[in-house]
Amino acid sequence: MNYQPKPLRSSEDDDTYEKKEDLLSALTSVVRFSINKKDDIQEFFKEVVNQIYRVVSADRVSLSLKGRMECNDVSSKKRPKVVYVPINIKENDMDICIGHIKLEKGRDQNIEPEEINFLETMAYLTGLKFQNSILELVVYEGLVQTLKVLVNTVEAKDVYTKFHSHRVAQYSLGIAKIMDLPKEEKDIIKIGGILHDIGKIAIPENILLKEGKLTEEEFNVIKMHTTFGNEILKPLRFFHQERMIVLYHHERWDGSGYPEGLKGENIPLPARILAVADSFDAMTSDRIYRKARSFEDALKEIKDLAGIKYDPYVVNAFDFFLKREYLK
Ligand SMILES: [Fe+2]
């Protein structure tokens, strides 16, 4: 990764206090950088390089996990023009070099010992953060897989809802793309879409799979799947945002939904998106008591209920998405 933003200060600037402030803020922003997804790691490395440019006036800074591993080249000269500072991770109490930060200065500049100290601290923090994040991501991926198995278990019980969650996730993601939501929100919608009915695992099968009409009491039990799902995910700190989808995907724009009767924009946007996708998939799938409706027919009903049951902006985006992808 080689890119070069403008240094924030010139090399002539020798205000020591401000430099210390810059140094502290550089270290802090590296420590605080949040890595939640695999893609964030590249962003994290960019941030490290950026923060080094803030503090050190250099011709070129790069961070590489591959290539030349000149891990012991840091202090071969007292005031070198190029240094490779190793990034280490711990394995069985041993330091394993996984890459380096490379800093180059121009012909008439040397790298000062305190700058090397700073780079070593940055490299140390980078290694530590990288190692912790990899562990967290492994745990996160493992949890997602386990939860998907749970969802499949629920859906496998009922031939009519098989793959429902995956289709809902697909439609929801399509809406999110049309609405040009940030990547972070799209990721939340993708996982939340798959997990949205996970609470159904706690609903008794005689109610969940009942073929005839549900009594009011039974329907009240079914409604509990939103709060059960929320409770299942609550102890897993990775899924805070996804939980909002699980809990609120049956809320309605006019406040007539459940579990809290939230209204309009008080319903989190990802849940408003899920509501449209979920209803559409339910309408266009076979049920034991009725045949699937056509896409055109279901879309018409969703559009008729825009501003009543569904967020009109979400319905607009869904209309656009469906016509582009399915109703060409
Ligand atoms: Fe649901």
Image (cartoon, grey):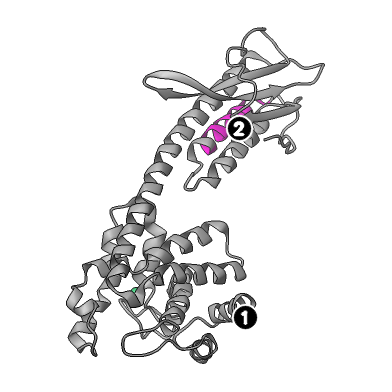
Q: What residue did someone put label 2 on?
A: 22
172 or 312: which is nearer to us?
A: 172
Q: Is residue 244 left or right of residue 318?
A: left
Which residue occupies 36% across, 47% down? 142
Residue 169: x and y in percent read: 46, 67
Residue 196: x and y in percent read: 37, 68
Which quadrant holds the N terminus? top right
Mark before the other along the chain sequence, 2 or 1:
2
Q: Residues within 10 Å of mark 2 (few under 14, many from 20)?
A: some
Q: What residue did someone put label 1 on?
A: 323
Q: Is residue 58 magenta?
A: no
Range covered by the magenta-colored residues = 15-29
Amino acid type of the residue that numbered disc 1 sits on in the rendered structure: Lys
In the rendered image, which quarter is residue 192 located in? bottom left
Camera-near label (2 vs 1) is 1
Q: Is residue 185 visible?
A: yes
Which element type, helix, strand or loop, lies under badge 2?
Answer: helix
Which residue occupies 31% across, 86% down? 288
Residue 111: x and y in percent read: 69, 16
Cα gap from disc 2 to disc 1, whole angstroms? 52 Å
Which element type, helix, strand or loop, lies under badge 1?
Answer: helix
Which residue occupies 54% across, 38% down? 29
182 or 111: which is nearer to us?
A: 182
Q: Residues within 10 Å of mark 1 (few under 14, many from 20)?
A: few
- Vertical order, 98 against 78 (above or below): below
Please tell me whether the stretch drawn in magenta is mainly helix, strand or loop. Answer: helix
Q: Is residue 23 magenta?
A: yes
Is label 2 in contact with label 1 (beta carbons under 8 Å)?
no
